[in-house]
Image: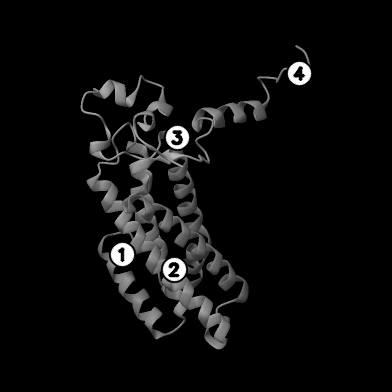
Amino acid sequence: MTTNQPDPRSWTVRLRTRLARTVPAGQLLPDRQPAYVRSWIYVFGVASLAAFVYVIASGLVLSLKGSAWWHTSSAGHFVNSTHLWSVELFFMFMVIHLWGKFFMAAWRGRRALTWITGAVAFIGSVGTAFTGYLSQSNFDSQWTAGQAKDGLNAVGIGSVFNVLNTGQMLLWHVMLLPLVLGVLIVLHIVLVRRHGVVPPFDAIPPDRDHAEVTGPPGADDALSPEPVAPVLR
């Protein structure tokens, strides 16, 4: 074996090969999209991602400054308020995106895992938001914790974690749940880039059968009907 040839036993070569198979060349950051992507229904996924990025950024600032900062400082109050409203926007955009893709049957074209990761990410974001009640550090947060404790005990999962444990819930909110949610979102984006955005029902020519649209087994990069749709630069 010459030195110019990569060693197939190397883990970096195997990882590079795996990544190349996961996202086809030119699909990770494409510079062209089908013309139907200009529809507003496709915008809410990107808007959800933008809101999530700001939620993480503002949450990092709040974590660095500590809980007393956003109660005693006007700057801290501003960052805390924008953190709250970015969460509100995140949920609004995500719900619209979720329902829009549901009515578009976004699991078409072997995109079932893409749909599943998006739905699970939404459920995980609900749990992440609910653990944020502790950031209030007042009687409202205590009342919320008490109500959550009764609800979780009623369904039999109160023994798994104690919502009255402030340290545990706060660490879940700032570390564990955002990490899980971030992994799900990254996986969702990778799957979108792998299979392409789901086309509207009327974007598939009626004279093409299902086999031509989805492509042969293993040809995941042929799932998007981009060659037959006008291209938006």
Judging by the rendered image, the residue that carries numbered circle 1 is: 152
Which residue is tagged 4? 4
Q: Quadrant of residue 212?
A: top left
Decide which of tag 2 and tag 3 comes sooner along the chain.
2
Looking at the image, which residue sits at the far right?
Answer: 3
Between 118 and 48, which is closer to the camera in this rendering?
A: 48
Residue furthest to the top in view is: 1
Disc 4 + disc 3, Cβ < 8 Å? no
Specify the label residue 86 is tagged with.
Answer: 2
Residue 30 at x, y percent in the picture: 50, 39
Question: Local crowd at mark 4 within 10 Å, few (<14), some, or many (≥20)?
Answer: few
- Of residues 138 and 47, the one nearer the viewer is 47
The amino acid on which the numbered mark 2 sits, given as a three-letter code, is: Ser
- The answer to whether the residues at label 1 and label 4 have Cβ atoms under 8 Å apart is no
x 31%, y 32%: residue: 109
Is the residue under label 1 in contact with that under label 3 (CB below 8 Å)?
no
Q: Secondary structure at mark 1?
A: helix
- In primary-sequence order, the first of circles 2 and 4 is 4
Q: Is residue 39 left or right of residue 137?
A: left
Q: Residue at x 62, y 71 (%)?
A: 64
Residue 132 image point, x, y percent: 43, 70
Marks 4/3: CA distance? 30 Å
Where does the N terminus fall, quadrant-wise? Answer: top right
Answer above or below: position of 232 versus 124: above
Q: Amino acid at mark 4?
A: Asn
Marks 1 and 4, how far apart in space? 60 Å
Residue at 65% from the left image edge and 26% from the top image edge = 13
